[in-house]
Amino acid sequence: MVVAMGAGDKGEPARVATSTASVSALEVQTPALSETTQVYGSVETTESPGVVEVPDFVGRSLAEVQLVASAAGISVDVVEDASVTPTSDGDARTVLEQEPACGGIVTIGSMVTVTVTPSVNPANSVTGLVVCLDPGHQSHSDTSQEPVGPGADETKDRVKGGSTGTTTLIPEYEITLQIALNLKARLEAEGISVVMTRETNDVNLSNAERARIANESGAALFVRVHGDGSPDPDASGISVLYPASSGWTVPISSASAEAAARVQSALIASTGAVNRGTIVRDDITGFNWSEVPAILVECGFMSNPVEDKLLSSPHYQDKLATGMASGIVNYLGR
């Protein structure tokens, strides 16, 4: 069994600090659990109904509201504002009012009624923006060295091969590519242009080279997709890493932190996984070489038998991709 170290550039276990920053507009509480049952994805407790906190939908596009509501497990009833003539592009409408209000607690499957009006600008604000997706690792590691940042004397391995699921024995590089391709399709459906660092496992791309692809693409966001790991087989949950405001990453740290918070909130709403928050790092080569806002999503622990199986499940991969897409769209359209 190979255990991941929970870092974008594997073999970098040090973590600088943890932040539980969240975005209230997307924050949805994890479904309530009984004392003996945990919720993963669509597996619900049998002792008490799941509940969620109603997100804040006011001022958001109907398309975004429907995506977030679906991830949270609630339905949306759309009511047209009678004083305004609807546009032909229904998904371009904006929410004026909602009932129940933001912060209310409802059971999963409940309905929120939203009153909408045509957007002042019906065009999708994220259309034409570029997102670079980096499925972590590759089929073979490359232990030759590269600088940890531009002009650095310190070096690290160019790229690791990644981890292997403790139960499924499926390698991390296969899982990350599957999730990233799912995410690619969802982002493209929103009008976003997607650049992939790789679309096959048989490549040799260093961490710095992956960042350069993002830089050269002019990406509005560089999203790295990984699996986490721990010596503790009970460790579980999702976290999103972002670069510290130090050294090479000062220009991108603030925007990266905001993207991390929005994506983390949407991921937890979509999956019901343990929320491990956002984590700032100053030691990841792929961050240090990036000139655009960058985040690294740790989708779950391949060292945990339950999450290992979930990560290879198409249904759970859908939940991960849905959450990431929702958070990315929310960040880009801010």
Image (cartoon, rainbow, N blue to C red):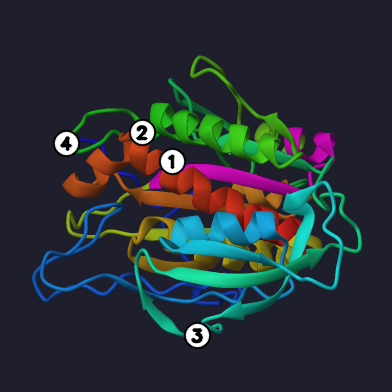
Could you tell me how far apart the alpha carbons at marks 4 and 2 are, in whole angstroms? 17 Å
Which of the two discs, 3 and 2, sits closer to the camera? 3
Residue 303: image x %, image y %? 24, 46
Q: Residues within 10 Å of mark 2 (few under 14, many from 20)?
A: few
Which of the two discs, 4 and 3, sits closer to the camera? 3
Labels 3 and 2: the sequence-earlier one: 3
Judged from this view, the residue extending furthest toward the front is 82
Labels 4 and 2: the sequence-earlier one: 4
State whether residue 326 is above or below residue 9. Answer: below
Q: Amino acid at mark 4?
A: Thr
Labels 1 and 3: the sequence-earlier one: 3
Residue 155: image x %, image y %? 60, 42
Camera sees residue 249: no
Q: In screen coordinates, is 166 left or right of 98?
A: left
In what element is the residue under mark 2? helix
Q: Quadrant of residue 334?
A: bottom right
Could you tell me how far apart the alpha carbons at marks 1 and 2 are, in whole angstroms? 6 Å
Q: Which residue is mark 2?
A: 314
Where's the N terminus, which quadrant? Answer: top left
Q: Residues within 10 Å of mark 3 (few under 14, many from 20)?
A: some
In what element is the residue under mark 4? loop
Q: Which residue is mark 3?
A: 103
In what element is the residue under mark 3? loop
In what element is the residue under mark 1? helix
Labels 4 and 1: the sequence-earlier one: 4
Q: Which residue is mark 1?
A: 318
